Amino acid sequence: MVDLFLNRVLVENNWDQDELNTEREIIGILENRILMLFFASGECDKCQEFLPVLNDFFKRLKDPAYIEYPKLLTLVYISLDKSEVQQERFLKELHKKVLFLAFEDPYRKELQAMFKVKDVPTVVVLRPDGSVLSPNAVQDICSFGCDCFRDWQEAAELVERSFMLNEDFDNLNMRSATDPLRRLKYKTEDDKRKNKWWTLWGKGKDGNEAEEEKDGVSDRNRKDGDKGTWWRR
């Protein structure tokens, strides 16, 4: 995923609109994170309606005013606005920790084509390795809020480098009835192939053990293993 924006300039949506243009800065802001690409336009009524929902979703996962340990999540606004003035107006409504591409950067259109974005608003969710978790998570964000991130995190096997909050423990058993379905939704063909490979490997392993028993090898292994089973004595 880091490669997606290497040699590009990402701009922070703060007062100074600081530019992140070095490889170190880009890696620091994107590495080991789930990335949300928000394709939208200020002239789109649906985008305007979705904007406060997205802002609330993002600040509850990233803003220290709402959470002690910000989640491993990055949001990049990919403007499909027709003018820079329109883009600037829309950016003023977006959370200040959001990143964006400059209006004059043609890479905006390349990303639109790369992820086959035909409608707005669209939120493409990417794993840290760049693979797609969701081609458009707008509906899920509107329906399930911050629970979406937990599902993305599990599907991406993303490990947080912070302790869980008390409220995280309190909410562990409070998943909705649709939660297993949502998590299954984020499973890709790669995940299925990995599980299939693991099953086949296990079968092969059982077959090898059967052969070893015929040769008497497994008996020697069990004797060696008995030496270490001190808790049974």
Image (tube, rainbow, N blue to C red):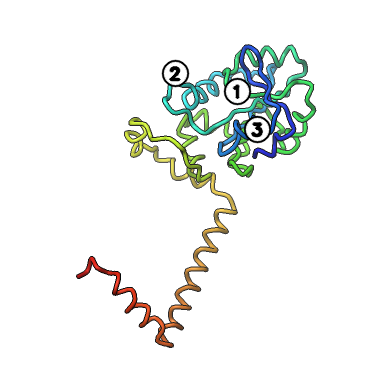
Q: Looking at the rendering, in which quadrant would you find the N terminus?
A: top right
Name the residue nearer the viewer: 158 or 58. 158
Q: Earlier in the sequence, mark 1 or mark 2?
A: 2
**Residue at the limit of the structure toward the left, as seen here:** 233
Give the alpha-carbon distance from disc 3 to disc 2, as whole Å: 27 Å
Circle 2: residue type:
Ala
Indicate the secondary structure of the residue bearing disc 2: loop
Name the residue nearer the viewer: 194 or 47. 194
| Residue, disc 3 | 24
Indicate the secondary structure of the residue bearing disc 3: helix
Give the alpha-carbon distance from disc 1 to disc 3, as whole Å: 18 Å
Q: Would you place residue 41 above or below residue 3 in this image? A: above
The answer to whether residue 182 shows anywhere in this view is: no
- Toward which corner of the image does residue 88 lie, by quadrant? top right
Residue at 59% across, 53% down: 189
Residue at 73% across, 24% down: 80
Q: Looking at the rendering, in which quadrant would you find the C terminus?
A: bottom left
Q: Earlier in the sequence, mark 3 or mark 2?
A: 3
Coordinates of residue 215 in the picture (x, y in percent): 43, 88
Q: Would you place residue 210 above or below residue 9 in this image? A: below
Circle 1: residue type:
Val
- Does 92 sit left or right of 101 as displayed? left
Circle 3: residue type:
Arg
Q: Which mark is residue 98?
A: 1
| Residue, disc 2 | 65
Closer to the eye: label 1 or 3: 3
